[in-house]
Image (cartoon, rainbow, N blue to C red):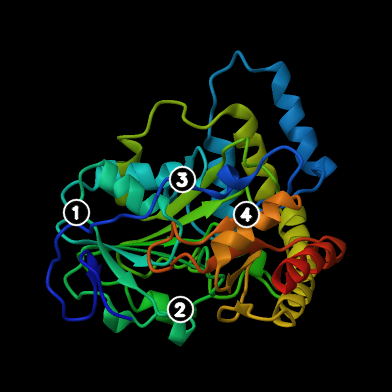
Amino acid sequence: MRGRPGEVRAGAGAPEAPAGEPDLGHHGDAEVAEGLVDLAVNVRRAPLPPWLAGPIAATLTDLARYPDPAAAREALAARHGRPPDEVLLTAGAAEGFVLLAQALRGVRRPVVVHPQFTEPEAALRAAGHRVERVLLDDADGFRLDPARVPADADLVMIGNPTNPTSVLHPARTVAALARPGRVLVVDEAFADTTAVPGRAGEPESLAGRRDLPGLLVVRSLTKTWGLAGLRVGYLLGAPELLARLAAVQPLWAVSTPALAAATACAGPVAVEAERAIAAQLAADRDHLVARLAALPGVRVAGRPASAFVLIHLPGAAAVRAALRERGWAVRRGDTFPGLGPDWLRVAVRDRATTDAFTRVLGEILEA
């Protein structure tokens, strides 16, 4: 894959600003409309369990009080084996990227590893940073090679598991990017989708690592629990780094209902439920991959490990339009740096939905 202006290869110098930027502000919700089956947004759709709905609803009688994040911070810290001052609550994971961009204005060489969620780069650019990109290759399954990240990059951002590729990088590979003088931001918004029943923790997560210099882990509670409208996430890192981010955060940024949700989602009931959900997700994902692989011209990228899969399909833009006409919304891939018009992202749903979707997709491809 040849580089373009603004894309970094190992050993390359600082590039000029990229031309012909993809739309970094485009997200899956823009694909969804009334009457369409939503395979574009990676948020699980299910009723809230009573242990989560109850605490949220209970806060609605006490909204005159300003939010106090102490209980949620302590609960999340306990979940990850860290002290409370290593947790910062945010209004969704996306707010964390804005705080980073605002607080770390002194970084000299910020690098974003793509393809990945576009908000980290968008937030950096909005704050005036000159962002460089490292593009992972489809030919290599979009796997990370730490040597491709410039050694003097003092801010590095990567997703794990990565949106939109659904690649889960080994923890040791991501940890190899950490070094003194660098802030390493790992977006683990979908880490709970990789939980394994019967095993503690999440494979390849760095959320409990306190020994890596400059590590900042971004977490979200909106995906698995269907809380995108509530906006709740958190950051894990060294107290001195989090203090810099907190200094630019608006007062009372996280609402009382969101804090109640965070506290509930940090408990043992939630952790065990996540593992069961992740196990079902893995089975549903395998079913989706098998059905897609049976269709002519469709190639599933890499080894999907999260709540979505990335597919390569020649003429994907026309196929996406035809799917909309038939009542289905999928996520276009060309707004992710490193991808192009022949990529689509598809959310994992239940088997009945997958069977209906792939049947329609097959009919479109045959036509």
User: Which residue carries the number 2 mark?
Assistant: 142
Residue at mark 3 to residue at mark 2: CA–CA distance: 23 Å
Determine the secondary structure under disc 1. Answer: loop
Q: Between residue 312 and residue 268, name the one nearer to us.
A: 312
Determine the secondary structure under disc 3. Answer: helix
- Checking the image for residue 130, the label placed there is 1
Mark 3 or 2, closer to the camera: 2
Instruction: Looking at this view, name the residue that lies furthest to the top.
Output: 64
Residue at mark 4 to residue at mark 2: CA–CA distance: 27 Å
**Marks 1 and 2: CB-CB under 8 Å?**
no
Mark 3 or 1, closer to the camera: 1
Image coords of residue 43 (percent x, y): 66, 51
Q: Between residue 302 and residue 264, name the one nearer to us.
A: 302
Image coords of residue 145 (percent x, y): 36, 83
Q: Residues within 10 Å of mark 1 (few under 14, many from 20)?
A: many
User: Which residue carries the number 3 mark?
Assistant: 94
**Marks 3 and 2: CB-CB under 8 Å?**
no
Query: Residue flagged by tag 4: what amino acid is it?
Result: Ala
